[in-house]
Image: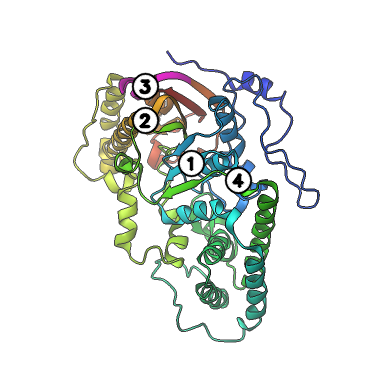
Amino acid sequence: MAIIQSHAVAAKTREKNTQQLLAYSPHEQQTVLFPPNGNGHAVFRDPAFADNKNLPIHRWVPWIAGYSASFVDDAISTYLANRKTALVLDPFCGVGTTLLQAVLRGHRAIGFEINPYPTLAARVKLSAPQINLAELDGKLVDMKAAAKDWRLTSAPAEVVPPPLKSRLPFFSPKVERQVLHALAFINGIDSAIIANLFRVAFGAVMVGISNYSYEPSLGSRPAAGKPLIEDAEVAQVLLTKLQTMRADIAWIQKEMPGEYFGAGRIINGDFFSANEKLAEASIDLMVTSPPYMNNYHYVRNTRPQLYWLNFISSPSEQKYLETHNFGQYWQTVRDVEPIALAFEHPGLAKILFQLRKTRLDQGAYGGPGWANYVTAYFNDCFRFVAVLKRVLARGGTGVIVIGNSIIQGIDIRIEQIIGEVGALQGLHLEAIQCIREKRVGASITQSSVRQGQRSKVTLSEFAVILRKR
């Protein structure tokens, strides 16, 4: 039976620990890297990724899907307290929060990420100790000098806008010309590690100078009640971001000498390939957050970066990422034949039966289409836990951050079902801990398309803790 610890109790325990992870001042550089974890039990701080906005290196790339560095540090402190070195896994590593925290603690880390843009960001973060600051400074000076002509000269012939289809031009003409000059400059950087640092910086700021915005999904600025961006100082925006990154690199190289920095590796692919890429019983700790069952379109929301950074160049390449994403998307499975549940779970089967009988007059937009989506999601959960069981070492722990979801007015307790799936696969369900009593998502859960009828159910967030005995 799962242990459900209230958020209020956890909050009282957390008050004893007043030091903030990686407290950072660019002037004073007062740093607390590894605060104690209360009384040694699994007490997690707020997992919201927003906390990473003020932490060196973590702050480089905004990312809606993720958790805080302090949450990862709590998991490491709890489950690897007596280990000098261990192998830490994140099967859905995104921009690398888990991996970076693991290597900061001197551990080895490995991650899987199917989307090439966050893969690049995570790899660049892990490369921070190896970046030559003198070489980076030279390129920053070169870009500042080159940018003086970007407004006055035609766009370079060697770089052209990608075939990214959008309702409005992604960049206004004056902005686009500068963007093309910036990309031409980046492509001319000889050092791959520094060129990739510039690419990550560009990917992090490009939406902010475009005619689109995240609300939180990618949409046009006019649709969000914002004016178009007719012009922007592209070089200034990019150089400001790069200066922040440069300060963080200098900080990490001073505070964390190479001999204390662990080794990290990221595989650009889905976790279901891990059976061929990870040895059996090799992982000591897994900390991850799979895509939530909220139909947030992770691939489509990174289309600007994917196209403008030349990771993809056609809808077919985009579709591959969509159809191989964990859990699929409602848009990709709503019109297919009913998908069968790949494992026995009477409670989930009852939910799926109820879904398939809901709003039949809406066809794929009603219950039948959403039942396919829910089934595909849990089938992938079952496959995920099966691979996890194989790669976890004896005594190894998996911490899965997940939230409940509301589909067609039905509150689906994903955290409980994943815990039960873990038990079905032979893992020990140690706990289901509430780590945030309310999370954002009303714009999704109260959509008439997704919900059918409005619900007052609260969206919460949990840590599902599985152990291999």
Q: Which residue is mark 3?
A: 427
> Can you tell which mark lies on residue 281?
2
Q: Is residue 254 left or right of residue 228?
A: right
Mark nearer the viewer, 1 or 3: 1
Task: Looking at this view, name the residue that lies furthest to the left.
Answer: 337
Between the residue at mark 1 and the residue at mark 2, the CA separation in whole angstroms equals 15 Å
Between the residue at mark 4 and the residue at mark 3, the CA separation in whole angstroms equals 35 Å
- Which amino acid is tagged 1? Ala
- Name which of mark 2 and mark 3 comes first in the sequence: 2
- Name which of mark 1 and mark 2 comes first in the sequence: 1
Question: Could you classify mark 2 by the number of other residues whose Cα lies within 10 Å: few (under 14), some (14-19), or many (20 or more)?
Answer: some
Q: Which residue is mark 4?
A: 259
- Which amino acid is tagged 2? Ala
- Which amino acid is tagged 4? Glu
- The magenta stretch is 420-431
Q: Which residue is mark 1?
A: 109
Q: How far from the left and from the top, in percent, is residue 239?
A: 65, 67
- Name which of mark 2 and mark 4 comes first in the sequence: 4
Instruction: State the SS at label 4.
Output: helix
Mark nearer the viewer, 4 or 1: 4
Above/below status of 160 relative to 335: below
Residue at x-position 51% and y-position 51%: 122
